[in-house]
Image (tube, helix red, strand yellow):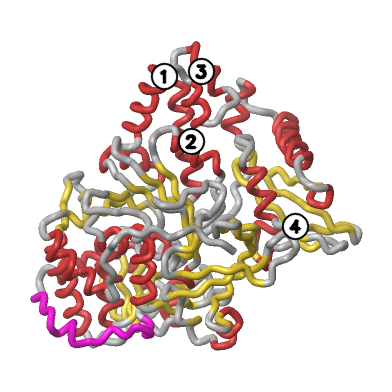
Amino acid sequence: MAKTEQKMYNERRFHAFREIIDYCAETYGKAPAFHIKNSDGSFRYISYLELKDRFYALCNVFLDLGLGEKRIAVTGSNCFEWVLSYLCAATVGVAVPIDKELDPEDIRSFLELAECDAVCADDLRMKGIQSTGDTPWRCLSFSGVLARSGEVSPERDRVWQREIKKDEMHVLLFTSGTTGSSKGVCLSQENICSDIYSTVSVVKITTGDKTLSVLPLHHTYECTLNCLLLLSRGACICYNGGLTRLQKDLVLYSPTVLVVVPALLKLLSRRLQKSVVSELPDRYRAVFADKSLGEGVNALPFFMRKIVVSRVRKALGGKLRLFIVGAAELDTTLVEDFGALGIRTLQGYGLTECSPLVAGNSDFYHNPASTGIAIPGVEVRIDNPNEEGVGEIITRGDNVMLGYYRDEEATAQVLRDGWFHTGDLGRMDEEGGLYITGRLKNVIVTSNGKNIYPEELETRLSQHEEISEVLVMADKKNGEEFIKAKILPNLEVLRERLGHLPTREEISSSVQKVIQEVNERIPQYKHIKVVDILTEALEKTTTQKIKRFGNNTK
């Protein structure tokens, strides 16, 4: 297939985290690396020079504790101490990020599975870990991390004496919330640094940028693209105090860049549209009755459009220029919504095993319908495509993991002939644009051999504002297989439309109307035959992906 000619920025490439720390301290000096709100409401800035001093000091603390070449877990809410602990753990040994939302017993299970010698955690998680049994691990609270990194001499030479090998594990991540079903992904610093280099080669990030960290740091998506990448370019990181505070924090910190998942972008778009409509003069409100946020804004008279765009941008902090979106399929309407406000939305595709980014839209390639083209230095192919060009997505590059932790069989299944087999299904266009159609293991094969991709139907349904959440699956009754959709209706939308809280009959009628519209646009064999209308939200992962197992499938 033909590929779009890759244009690239001339950016510096790093091979280890300590290189990033040293270069940024020398280049950006007193510029803020972190902008932090203290518990008393005051603010504090941590410069790149202070980050360097604390980095080397904490590395020496770890070495003094005998943690050289040992596994050090990091768990807790997003904060500077989390990042500092992670950087130092990965430099002197192996960093093991663990989901802060896990039960203390599950956190302990991962500590044992990863053979950790120490754990760094915020006070809440540390209390839980220590209250559930003996603690054979060295325990360093985040408050202790902050204190000790300010007390110990930042001796650099001792840290640089330790070689960071290109093919050596320095980060160990787990792919799910239970040890029984989880795979440990082994990443080198070269894996992560190569992904950073490839990304900044096509998406410009500068020292003038500021981000608001919203997604959990234990995921490579947030940790690589919205933390290490930003730090490598001299940008500034702030932390969101929770989704209920998101819009307040946007105004408080005025970020220029946000790394989000589609569910968060959709929520933000809906909130903004509701706010816009409530503030418009009556004669303009009807414009938004059957239009998305972007369509409505563009349909307003020029003078009113200018006022609305200015107000909305102010509600987002006034400086936001870029959304980077991943982890699930993006509704192209959202790209148009924020484009109408002067904010670019770049969708990408990646996996934990690839550090994580594989392909993406960029400053040089922008196609909202696609997840983008392979980033520089990474190859992407479609393996064994069918008549529609759909096959398994495979990739290779310096960003691909070393393998799965203590699981040679699982590693051999996905790393074959130099290519990583993602388990995702997709197709590519003539320009190399990648389109994700679903997960290989989620494909529903009908009795006559037809393939149905649940993700395709979920995307179609989610485009209707009456639908808040949806999960599509195969089901059977009396030996007959059919397609079923579990749907959580958006009661707020229905209430606004009807002028009152909807009855069960009205909810059912609205949902069935959406199902009918979707079924009319797809082949008969893909039709949704059964609908379960939910009263509670579907279970999700910490990146807001709807789980395809457990209670959701019952």
Can you identify the residue that label 2 sits on? 337
The stretch drawn in magenta includes residue 217? no
Q: Position of residue 196 (x, y in %)?
A: 35, 65
**The disc label shown at residue 285, or none:** 3
Query: Observer-nearest residue: 36 or 206?
Result: 206
Camera-side mark, 4 or 3: 4
Q: How far apart are labels 3 and 2 at the CA level?
A: 17 Å
Along the polypeptide, which appears first: circle 4 or circle 3? Answer: 3
Q: Position of residue 336 (x, y in %)?
A: 50, 37
Can you identify the residue that label 4 sits on? 452
Judge the density around disc 3: few (<14), some (14-19), many (≥20) Cα neighbours within 10 Å: some
Check disc 1 and give the amino acid type: Phe
Q: Position of residue 455 (x, y in %)?
A: 65, 54
Residue farthest top in this picture: 283
Q: How far apart are labels 4 and 2 at the CA level?
A: 29 Å
Along the polypeptide, which appears first: circle 3 or circle 1? Answer: 3
542 on left or right of 531: left
Camera-side mark, 1 or 4: 1
**SS under mark 4:** strand
**SS under mark 3:** helix
Q: Position of residue 41 (x, y in %)?
A: 20, 44
Can you identify the residue that label 1 sits on? 302
Q: Residue at x 54, y 76 (%)?
A: 420
Quadrant where the C terminus lies? bottom right
Camera-side mark, 3 or 1: 1
Q: Quadrant of residue 321?
A: top left
541 on left or right of 91: right
Residue range in magenta is 153-169
**SS under mark 2:** helix
Along the polypeptide, which appears first: circle 1 or circle 4? Answer: 1
